[in-house]
Amino acid sequence: MNDISKAGLPVENGPHSRITMVDEDDRIFYDAAVKASAYLVTGNTRHFPSESFVVTPANFLSIYQQAGGG
């Protein structure tokens, strides 16, 4: 988590996406990931649109390790 915290960037709140969400409370996380061009790491991928940046924690760790992290 320290590596992720060091690399994190603030994201300004702005216009919301217009896609259909299973749970509207999750929209803020989806929109932040889109605006930051970042991964959305969740154990509940079915609540989000099927996008390559929406990944499980295990998928993210694999991507992170392949990129030379950790």
Image: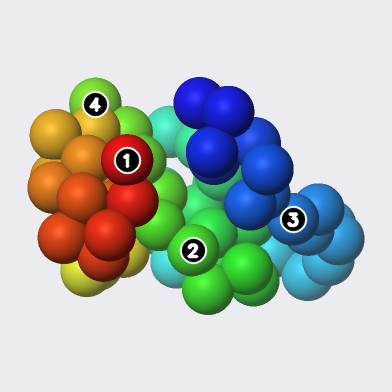
Q: Position of residue 69 (x, y in %)?
A: 33, 51
> Is residue 3 in view?
yes
Q: Count of labels shown?
A: 4
Q: Secondary structure at mark 1?
A: loop
Mark 1 residue crowding within 10 angstroms, few (<14) / some (14–19) / many (20+): few
Q: State the residue in front, 56 or 51.
A: 56
The amino acid type, in three-letter code, at marker 1 is: Gly
Mark 4 residue crowding within 10 angstroms, few (<14) / some (14–19) / many (20+): few
Of the numbered discs 2 and 3, the one sitting upstream in the chain is 3
Q: State the residue in front, 53 or 47.
A: 53
Residue named by callout 3: 9
Of the numbered discs 3 and 4, the one sitting upstream in the chain is 3
Residue named by callout 1: 70
The amino acid type, in three-letter code, at marker 2 is: Ala
Residue named by callout 4: 43
Q: Nearer the viewer, mark 3 or mark 4?
A: 3
Residue named by callout 2: 38
The amino acid type, in three-letter code, at marker 4 is: Gly
Question: Which residue is located at x 86 percent, y 60 percent?
Answer: 12
Question: Which residue is located at x 16 percent, y 60 percent?
Answer: 66
The amino acid type, in three-letter code, at marker 3 is: Leu
The residues tagged by marks 1 and 4 sit, at their Cα atoms, a distance apart of 21 Å
